[in-house]
Protein backbone atom coordinates (compact mmCIF):
# COMPACT_ATOMS: atom_id res chain seq x y z
CA UNK A 1 0.00 0.00 0.00
CA UNK A 2 1.23 3.49 -0.84
CA UNK A 3 2.09 5.62 2.16
CA UNK A 4 1.02 9.27 2.08
CA UNK A 5 3.20 12.02 3.56
CA UNK A 6 3.09 15.81 3.63
CA UNK A 7 6.21 17.85 2.89
CA UNK A 8 7.16 21.45 3.51
CA UNK A 9 8.90 24.06 1.31
CA UNK A 10 12.40 23.01 2.35
CA UNK A 11 11.81 19.43 1.21
CA UNK A 12 10.25 20.62 -2.01
CA UNK A 13 13.40 22.65 -2.69
CA UNK A 14 15.64 19.62 -2.13
CA UNK A 15 13.72 17.60 -4.74
CA UNK A 16 15.42 19.72 -7.42
CA UNK A 17 18.76 20.41 -5.76
CA UNK A 18 22.18 18.86 -6.39
CA UNK A 19 21.44 15.22 -5.47
CA UNK A 20 24.80 14.68 -3.77
CA UNK A 21 24.02 17.48 -1.32
CA UNK A 22 20.51 16.28 -0.50
CA UNK A 23 20.10 14.76 3.02
CA UNK A 24 19.88 10.97 2.73
CA UNK A 25 16.39 10.79 4.27
CA UNK A 26 15.17 13.03 1.43
CA UNK A 27 17.08 11.06 -1.20
CA UNK A 28 15.22 7.98 0.05
CA UNK A 29 11.90 9.85 0.00
CA UNK A 30 12.47 10.93 -3.60
CA UNK A 31 13.32 7.36 -4.63
CA UNK A 32 10.15 6.06 -2.99
CA UNK A 33 8.02 8.64 -4.80
CA UNK A 34 9.53 7.49 -8.10
CA UNK A 35 8.86 3.82 -7.34
CA UNK A 36 5.36 4.56 -6.08
CA UNK A 37 5.94 3.44 -2.48
CA UNK A 38 5.16 6.94 -1.20
CA UNK A 39 2.79 9.67 -2.35
CA UNK A 40 3.83 13.18 -1.36
CA UNK A 41 1.28 15.90 -0.64
CA UNK A 42 2.46 19.41 -1.51
CA UNK A 43 0.48 22.07 0.35
CA UNK A 44 -0.05 25.10 -1.89
CA UNK A 45 1.22 27.28 0.94
CA UNK A 46 4.59 25.44 0.77
CA UNK A 47 4.64 25.96 -3.00
CA UNK A 48 4.02 29.69 -2.43
CA UNK A 49 6.97 29.83 -0.03
CA UNK A 50 9.27 28.26 -2.59
CA UNK A 51 7.99 30.69 -5.23
CA UNK A 52 8.92 33.53 -2.86
CA UNK A 53 12.47 32.17 -2.55
CA UNK A 54 13.01 31.39 -6.22
CA UNK A 55 11.64 34.77 -7.34
CA UNK A 56 14.04 36.46 -4.95
CA UNK A 57 16.89 34.40 -6.43
CA UNK A 58 15.86 35.37 -9.99
CA UNK A 59 15.04 31.75 -10.85
CA UNK A 60 11.42 32.02 -11.93
CA UNK A 61 11.86 29.86 -15.03
CA UNK A 62 13.38 27.06 -12.93
CA UNK A 63 10.40 27.33 -10.58
CA UNK A 64 7.96 27.15 -13.52
CA UNK A 65 9.69 24.00 -14.76
CA UNK A 66 9.55 22.45 -11.28
CA UNK A 67 5.84 23.27 -11.02
CA UNK A 68 5.28 21.65 -14.41
CA UNK A 69 7.05 18.50 -13.16
CA UNK A 70 4.99 18.31 -9.96
CA UNK A 71 1.78 18.70 -11.94
CA UNK A 72 2.83 15.88 -14.27
CA UNK A 73 4.19 13.48 -11.65
CA UNK A 74 2.53 10.35 -10.43
CA UNK A 75 2.49 10.00 -6.65
CA UNK A 76 2.47 13.76 -6.17
CA UNK A 77 -0.66 15.55 -4.93
CA UNK A 78 -0.86 19.33 -5.00
CA UNK A 79 -3.22 20.15 -2.17
CA UNK A 80 -5.22 23.32 -2.33
CA UNK A 81 -5.82 25.31 0.83
CA UNK A 82 -9.59 25.21 1.04
CA UNK A 83 -12.63 25.18 3.30
CA UNK A 84 -11.97 21.58 4.35
CA UNK A 85 -8.76 22.75 6.01
CA UNK A 86 -10.60 25.65 7.68
CA UNK A 87 -13.12 23.16 9.10
CA UNK A 88 -10.28 21.05 10.47
CA UNK A 89 -8.75 24.19 12.00
CA UNK A 90 -12.06 24.82 13.77
CA UNK A 91 -11.41 21.73 15.88
CA UNK A 92 -8.30 23.36 17.37
CA UNK A 93 -9.25 25.34 20.45
CA UNK A 94 -5.90 27.06 20.87
CA UNK A 95 -4.58 29.65 18.47
CA UNK A 96 -1.51 28.64 16.45
CA UNK A 97 0.76 30.19 13.88
CA UNK A 98 -1.46 30.05 10.78
CA UNK A 99 1.24 28.79 8.44
CA UNK A 100 2.08 25.78 10.62
CA UNK A 101 -1.57 25.05 11.37
CA UNK A 102 -2.53 24.99 7.68
CA UNK A 103 0.27 22.53 6.89
CA UNK A 104 -0.55 20.36 9.92
CA UNK A 105 -4.24 20.30 8.96
CA UNK A 106 -3.21 19.29 5.43
CA UNK A 107 -1.91 16.10 7.09
CA UNK A 108 -5.29 15.54 8.77
CA UNK A 109 -7.11 16.21 5.50
CA UNK A 110 -5.08 13.44 3.85
CA UNK A 111 -5.35 11.04 6.79
CA UNK A 112 -1.66 10.94 7.50
CA UNK A 113 0.39 11.96 10.50
CA UNK A 114 3.75 11.88 8.70
CA UNK A 115 5.43 15.15 7.81
CA UNK A 116 8.89 15.73 6.36
CA UNK A 117 10.20 18.97 7.81
CA UNK A 118 12.82 20.39 10.17
CA UNK A 119 10.21 22.28 12.17
CA UNK A 120 9.86 20.59 15.58
CA UNK A 121 6.57 22.39 16.18
CA UNK A 122 4.78 19.88 13.97
CA UNK A 123 5.63 17.19 16.51
CA UNK A 124 5.46 19.25 19.70
CA UNK A 125 2.21 21.11 18.99
CA UNK A 126 0.36 19.01 16.43
CA UNK A 127 1.62 15.59 17.54
CA UNK A 128 2.69 14.61 14.04
CA UNK A 129 5.41 12.09 13.18
CA UNK A 130 8.29 14.31 12.17
CA UNK A 131 10.76 13.00 9.61
CA UNK A 132 13.70 15.34 9.90
CA UNK A 133 17.43 15.59 9.10
CA UNK A 134 20.56 17.47 10.27
CA UNK B 1 26.84 17.18 -36.51
CA UNK B 2 26.78 14.06 -34.33
CA UNK B 3 25.49 11.04 -36.24
CA UNK B 4 22.95 8.82 -34.56
CA UNK B 5 23.46 5.06 -34.55
CA UNK B 6 20.50 2.76 -34.83
CA UNK B 7 20.61 -0.81 -33.56
CA UNK B 8 18.17 -3.25 -35.13
CA UNK B 9 16.99 -6.74 -34.29
CA UNK B 10 14.31 -9.03 -35.65
CA UNK B 11 12.07 -11.01 -33.32
CA UNK B 12 9.14 -13.35 -33.60
CA UNK B 13 6.03 -12.11 -31.85
CA UNK B 14 4.77 -14.73 -29.39
CA UNK B 15 1.30 -15.26 -27.90
CA UNK B 16 -0.75 -12.16 -27.09
CA UNK B 17 1.68 -10.02 -29.09
CA UNK B 18 4.55 -10.38 -26.63
CA UNK B 19 8.05 -9.36 -27.63
CA UNK B 20 11.20 -9.18 -25.51
CA UNK B 21 13.40 -6.12 -25.13
CA UNK B 22 16.93 -7.59 -25.42
CA UNK B 23 18.83 -7.66 -22.11
CA UNK B 24 21.62 -5.55 -23.54
CA UNK B 25 19.14 -2.81 -24.44
CA UNK B 26 17.40 -3.08 -21.06
CA UNK B 27 20.74 -2.65 -19.33
CA UNK B 28 21.64 0.34 -21.48
CA UNK B 29 18.39 2.09 -20.59
CA UNK B 30 18.32 0.81 -16.98
CA UNK B 31 14.97 -0.83 -17.56
CA UNK B 32 14.25 -3.15 -14.64
CA UNK B 33 11.43 -5.55 -13.78
CA UNK B 34 8.16 -3.72 -13.11
CA UNK B 35 9.39 -0.51 -14.77
CA UNK B 36 6.90 0.94 -17.21
CA UNK B 37 7.48 1.70 -20.87
CA UNK B 38 5.50 4.00 -23.14
CA UNK B 39 4.57 2.80 -26.64
CA UNK B 40 3.62 5.05 -29.53
CA UNK B 41 2.13 3.87 -32.80
CA UNK B 42 3.36 6.15 -35.57
CA UNK B 43 1.69 7.00 -38.89
CA UNK B 44 4.55 5.32 -40.75
CA UNK B 45 3.60 1.99 -39.07
CA UNK B 46 6.53 2.01 -36.67
CA UNK B 47 6.22 1.51 -32.94
CA UNK B 48 8.33 3.63 -30.62
CA UNK B 49 9.04 2.22 -27.15
CA UNK B 50 10.41 4.56 -24.47
CA UNK B 51 11.23 3.96 -20.84
CA UNK B 52 8.69 5.89 -18.80
CA UNK B 53 10.56 8.50 -16.78
CA UNK B 54 9.14 9.95 -13.59
CA UNK B 55 9.79 13.73 -13.64
CA UNK B 56 11.65 13.33 -10.31
CA UNK B 57 14.21 11.14 -12.10
CA UNK B 58 15.49 14.10 -14.09
CA UNK B 59 18.71 14.98 -12.28
CA UNK B 60 19.43 18.33 -13.90
CA UNK B 61 20.00 20.28 -10.68
CA UNK B 62 17.20 22.64 -11.64
CA UNK B 63 17.79 24.90 -8.64
CA UNK B 64 21.54 25.20 -9.23
CA UNK B 65 23.07 28.32 -7.71
CA UNK B 66 20.35 28.70 -5.08
CA UNK B 67 21.08 27.67 -1.50
CA UNK B 68 18.58 25.75 0.67
CA UNK B 69 16.28 27.76 2.95
CA UNK B 70 17.95 29.29 5.99
CA UNK B 71 16.07 29.62 9.31
CA UNK B 72 15.94 33.39 8.74
CA UNK B 73 14.41 32.96 5.29
CA UNK B 74 11.78 30.59 6.64
CA UNK B 75 10.80 33.16 9.26
CA UNK B 76 10.78 35.93 6.65
CA UNK B 77 8.58 34.01 4.22
CA UNK B 78 6.11 33.10 6.99
CA UNK B 79 5.82 36.79 7.91
CA UNK B 80 5.32 37.62 4.26
CA UNK B 81 2.40 35.15 4.09
CA UNK B 82 0.77 36.30 7.31
CA UNK B 83 2.24 39.65 8.37
CA UNK B 84 2.44 40.30 12.10
CA UNK B 85 2.28 43.87 13.33
CA UNK B 86 5.12 44.49 15.78
Image (spheres, grey):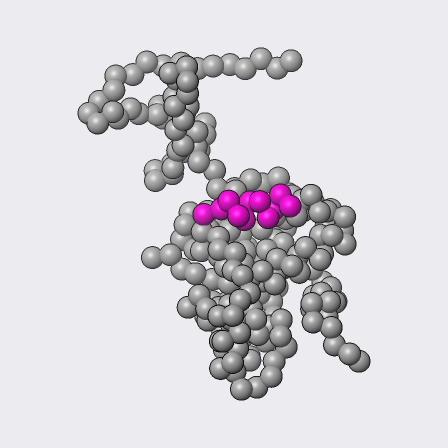
Residue A65 shown in magenta: yes
Q: Magenta stretch?
A: A64-74
Q: Residue at x 69, y 67 (%)?
A: B81
Q: Main secondary structure of the magenta part?
A: helix
The answer to which image quadrant residue A121 occupies is bottom right
In the picture provided, is A92 more to the left or to the right than A99? left
In the rendered image, the quadrant that contains the N terminus of chain A is bottom left
Q: Position of residue B25 (x, y in %)?
A: 41, 24
Q: How many numbered badges does the structure rendering display? A: 0
In the rendered image, the quadrant that contains the C terminus of chain A is bottom right
Instruction: Looking at this view, name the residue that lies furthest to the left.
Output: B15
Instruction: Looking at this view, name the residue that lies furthest to the bottom.
Output: A93
Q: Residue at x 38, y 23 (%)?
A: B41
Q: Is residue B41 visible?
A: yes
The answer to which image quadrant residue A12 occupies is bottom right
Q: Residue at x 51, y 14 (%)?
A: B5
Q: Relative to the observer, which residue lies in front, A128 or A28?
A: A128
Q: Position of residue A131 (x, y in %)?
A: 52, 66
In the picture provided, is A57 more to the left or to the right than B55? right
The answer to which image quadrant residue A51 occupies is bottom right
In the picture provided, is A107 more to the left or to the right than B21? right
Q: Position of residue B67 (x, y in %)?
A: 72, 53
Q: Residue at x 55, y 45 (%)?
A: A69
Q: Say above or below: A119 vs A51.
A: below
Q: Is residue B27 visible?
A: no
Residue A71 shown in magenta: yes
Q: Relative to the observer, which residue lies in front, A19 or B57?
A: B57
Q: Say above or below: A97 vs A37.
A: below
Instruction: Looking at this view, name the residue that lies furthest to the right.
Output: B86
Q: Relative to the observer, which residue lies in front, A102 or A12?
A: A102
Amino acid sequence: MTEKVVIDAQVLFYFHYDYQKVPSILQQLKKKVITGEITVVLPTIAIAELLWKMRKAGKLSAFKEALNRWENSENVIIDEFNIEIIKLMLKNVKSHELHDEIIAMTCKKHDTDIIYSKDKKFKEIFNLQLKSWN
Amino acid sequence: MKSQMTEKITQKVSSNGRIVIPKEWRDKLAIEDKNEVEMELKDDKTILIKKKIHPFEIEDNLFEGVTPFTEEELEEVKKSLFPIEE
